[in-house]
Amino acid sequence: MPADLNDYFNKKNGSNSGNKNSQPFGNFKAPEFNFKGFGKFAPAIYTAIILILLFVLARPFAIVNSGEMGIKVTTGEFDSKALGPGLHFFIPLFQKIIIVDTKVRQVTYASVEGVNESNLNRGSGVINKSSISVLDSRGLSVSIDVTVQYSLNEAVVPQTIATWNTNWEDKIIDPTVRDVVRSVVGKYTAEELPANRNAIASQINEDIGRIIANLPNKPVTLNSVQLREIVLPAGVKQQIELVQIAKQEAERAAQEAIKKATLAEGEANATIISSKGRADAARIEADAQAYANKEIANSLNNPLLNLKQIEVQGKFNEALKTNTDAKIFLTPGGAVPNIWVDTKDAKQQSAISR
């Protein structure tokens, strides 16, 4: 600091030493700076110091990180070309750079205690909101939990921010999701919602995707829409559970009846098979007997019969040799001769009785 300036502060401090509270400087002693050695370079040094201070305070630069894009605005006009990652400068008071997150973002509508519209974590790309309240087809209130993932279309980021501003999510994603969910779910009664969950999820995904894709310049890319949960009123939930229990009991009874019918049918078939088996066995046995009889009959020819007759006559002749009193009459014919015994003979009767 120049010597005359130092003298000024010293004199000012000395004149006020008797009344410390009357002047704002009090016992302040100005630091002594001696720039005499710089000579003619002193003005340049002052200028440099001032410029550095202004640079630090004004911060006429912005750093764009990976996953972000910068938009330079000059006197309110958005540049059509976005700035990529890196260090970018602008003119204070006339220009500014808006940093926009282009990474995948997520908004979750959930029935979680403590989650509300003000509990937003936008910095991490995750937004939590309360469940979407919907009236079913009968006017009964239900809650729907949904998770939506999306990201900005990098090709049109400046146009998107110029049209929708930095709170584009509240103008594009949120109203679209709420409108679609209420429209789709409102077609069903509360009792029908669990059974039609897959159809509802598919319809919500399709409708949100169609609406987002039809926006001018396609500002947003929709990644996924997930139906997390359908929260029913306690009374409706209990009624559905009772219906499910009754249905399960009916199914169990039907399965038991089918089981018994199958068992009875099996026993009946077994009886039929057994009876048929016995009948087939009897038929086979009869056929075999008939076949045997036929074969026997075919084998009884005249020479064989004559031979049998001769054999029998021979046996009777041998018997008459020892039983001389017997009166036996032989009549030839058939397989064996006919035998007639005279039972009137007393000796013969006695022989027969013995």
Image: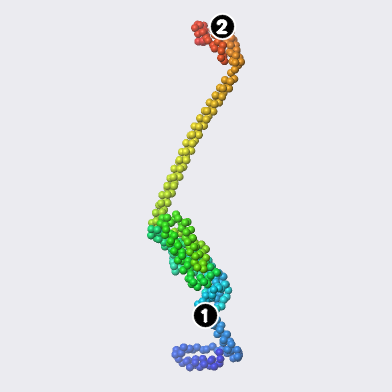
Residue at horizontal 59 percent and vertical 17 percent from the top: 301
The answer to whether one can see residue 142 in this image is no
Q: Which secondary structure lies at badge 1?
A: loop
- Counting from the top left corner in percent of width and height, residue 205 is at 49, 60
Quadrant position of residue 314: top right
Q: Is residue 188 left or right of residue 319?
A: left
What mark, if any, has residue 324 been given in the picture? 2
Residue at horizontal 46 percent and vertical 64 percent from the top: 177
Quadrant position of residue 55: bottom right
Q: How many marks?
A: 2
The quadrant of the image that shows the N terminus is bottom right
The answer to whether one can see residue 189 in this image is yes
- Counting from the top left corner in percent of width and height, residue 51 is at 56, 84
Pointer 1 residue: 94
Quadrant position of residue 4: bottom right
Residue at horizontal 54 percent and vertical 80 percent from the top: 91
Could you give the CA–CA distance between mark 1 and mark 2, rounded to whole angstroms?
Answer: 165 Å
Observer-nearest residue: 188 or 17?
188
Q: Which secondary structure lies at badge 2?
A: loop
